[in-house]
């Protein structure tokens, strides 16, 4: 059964409990309003039946066990989900993602202007990870934009907890430049579509068995960071070859009315595949995504990056660098924030997101876990705070990301460089303790 997390008013899978007692742990009783209407509690109008307070709520008890600074009950379960993703296949329900269509004669030029990534030479079916920057160069959103295979326009896939903000920021940017791009239309299809992600080294073989349109998912026919319109179980889907966990994977963007049929087919095919190939195939939730994305160094807007941080500071400067290096004589490489980012690039980094890992144990012998806003130390000087953290179940270490600020050091340094970062002795401070940390110039896990 599934234990849920709440994001942006949506429920999303957090982790999945399996085993003999899984049914009782996830059994969700009717909502009882915390007993507020148990005995004549209806004050505004008559005619309502009393709602008795639940005498037992095992689901709530299971959730409350997660509210601790110590080891959580879900730790081993999430480890199993990560193992399946790295060695077999997992299914992620990411339906709460934002899904926006951009169409019209000016859609291509408008996308090129609002995105930091260079889109002007992208082929039909290309998928590009990009940032959307404000005039100061701060990152307002990081998302993917696909040039639809049929040439009808572009398709944004945005993180679910920021979908309303992202949609309205894009809408506002287009309205502010309506004279420049008069024929462009933005449509929010988030409530019309679901998104099922199939990830893991065996994802291609499993999904291929359900493709009914004759399309091949092979490396030669379906490259990374591309998308195709195809059919799964005779249901049309927009299939993207992407990953947020660092494994071979595919996303199925499908109408809500059809998503359950595809999910049921995946589960049935997955059960047989697991038996035939002797590999783990299972559902997985966002705790596993957080662990594996941290291992891969993938960013989460609101934590690793915000509208204060530039792409270069967030170590995703590649999303803007191609455009910044081009001469912009005819305006074809212009984008929002370009001038600010060029000035920022010329001055050199004064603050930067760093990745640190800790291999310490607590008094019980469990890994030391962080929760955010711990202090980051370099050579005995506090340089910043942890912005996001997760335990990497593959590398067996706690991972922390946070910004270091050059103005906090007493050293005579003009700008932050990898050489300067690598030369330091790093620690993370938490509740009166300091734990030795290792600095990583790139992601701590290297995908196979």
Image: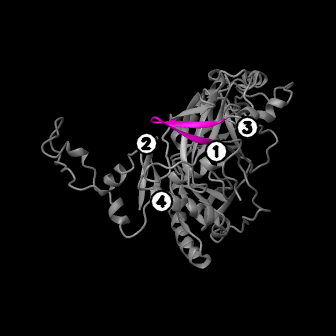
Name the one closer to the observer, 103 or 245. 245
Q: CA distance from mark 3 to mark 1?
A: 13 Å
Q: Main secondary structure of the magenta part?
A: strand
Q: CA distance from mark 2 to mark 3?
A: 30 Å
Q: CA distance from mark 2 to mark 4?
A: 28 Å
Name the one closer to the observer, 448 or 427. 427
Question: To which quarter of the image does residue 209 belong?
Answer: bottom right
Q: Which residue is mark 4?
A: 76
Classify the position of the N terminus by image quarter: bottom left
Q: Which residue is mark 3?
A: 319
Q: CA distance from mark 4 to mark 1?
A: 23 Å
Q: Residues within 10 Å of mark 2 (few under 14, many from 20)?
A: few
User: Would you say the residues marked 2 and 3 are in contact, meaning their CB atoms lie under 8 Å apart?
Assistant: no
The magenta segment is 425-437
Residue at coordinates 52% horizontally, 62% vertically from top-left? 80
Q: Earlier in the sequence, mark 2 or mark 1?
A: 2
């Amino acid at each position: 059964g599934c234990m849920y997390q709440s994001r942006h008013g949506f429920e999303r899978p957090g982790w999945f409990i399996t085993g003999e007692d899984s049914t009782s742990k996830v059994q969700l009783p009717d909502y009882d309003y915390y007993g507020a209407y148990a005995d004549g509690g209806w004050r505004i109008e008559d005619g309502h039946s009393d709602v008795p307070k639940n005498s037992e709520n095992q689901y709530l008890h299971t959730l409350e066990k997660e509210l601790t600074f110590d080891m959580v009950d879900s730790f081993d379960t999430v480890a199993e989900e990560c193992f399946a993703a790295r060695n077999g296949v997992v299914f992620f329900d990411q339906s709460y993602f934002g899904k926006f269509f951009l169409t019209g004669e000016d859609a291509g030029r408008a996308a090129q202007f609002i995105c930091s990534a260079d889109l002007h030479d992208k082929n039909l079916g290309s998928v590009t990870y990009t940032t959307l920057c404000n005039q100061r160069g701060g990152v307002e959103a990081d998302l993917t934009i696909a040039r639809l295979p049929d040439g009808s326009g572009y398709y944004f896939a945005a993180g679910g907890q920021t979908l309303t903000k992202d949609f309205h920021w894009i809408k506002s940017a287009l309205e502010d430049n309506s004279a420049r791009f008069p024929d462009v239309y933005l449509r929010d299809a988030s409530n019309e579509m679901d998104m099922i992600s199939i990830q893991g080294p065996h994802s291609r073989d499993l999904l291929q068995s359900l493709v009914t349109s004759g399309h091949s998912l092979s490396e030669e026919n379906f490259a990374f960071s591309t998308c195709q319109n195809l059919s799964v179980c005779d249901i049309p889907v927009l299939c993207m070859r992407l990953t947020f966990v660092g494994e071979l994977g595919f996303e199925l963007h499908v109408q809500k009315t059809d998503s359950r049929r595809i999910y049921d087919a995946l589960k049935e095919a997955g059960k047989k595949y697991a038996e035939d190939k002797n590999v783990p195939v299972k559902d997985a939730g966002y705790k596993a995504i957080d662990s594996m994305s941290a291992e891969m160094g993938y960013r989460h807007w609101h934590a690793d990056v915000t509208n204060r941080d530039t792409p270069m500071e967030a170590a995703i400067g590649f999303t803007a660098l191609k455009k910044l290096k081009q001469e912009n004589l005819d305006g074809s490489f212009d984008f929002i924030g370009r001038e600010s980012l060029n000035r920022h690039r010329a001055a050199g980094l004064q603050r930067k997101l760093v990745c640190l890992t800790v291999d310490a144990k607590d008094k019980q012998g469990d890994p030391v876990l962080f929760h955010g806003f711990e202090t980051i130390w370099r050579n005995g000087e506090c340089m910043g705070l942890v912005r996001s953290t997760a335990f990497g179940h593959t590398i067996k270490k706690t991972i922390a990301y946070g910004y270091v600020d050059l103005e906090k050091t007493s050293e005579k340094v003009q700008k932050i460089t990898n050489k300067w970062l690598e030369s330091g002795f790093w620690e993370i401070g938490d509740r009166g303790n300091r734990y030795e940390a290792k600095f990583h110039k790139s992601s701590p896990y290297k995908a196979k």
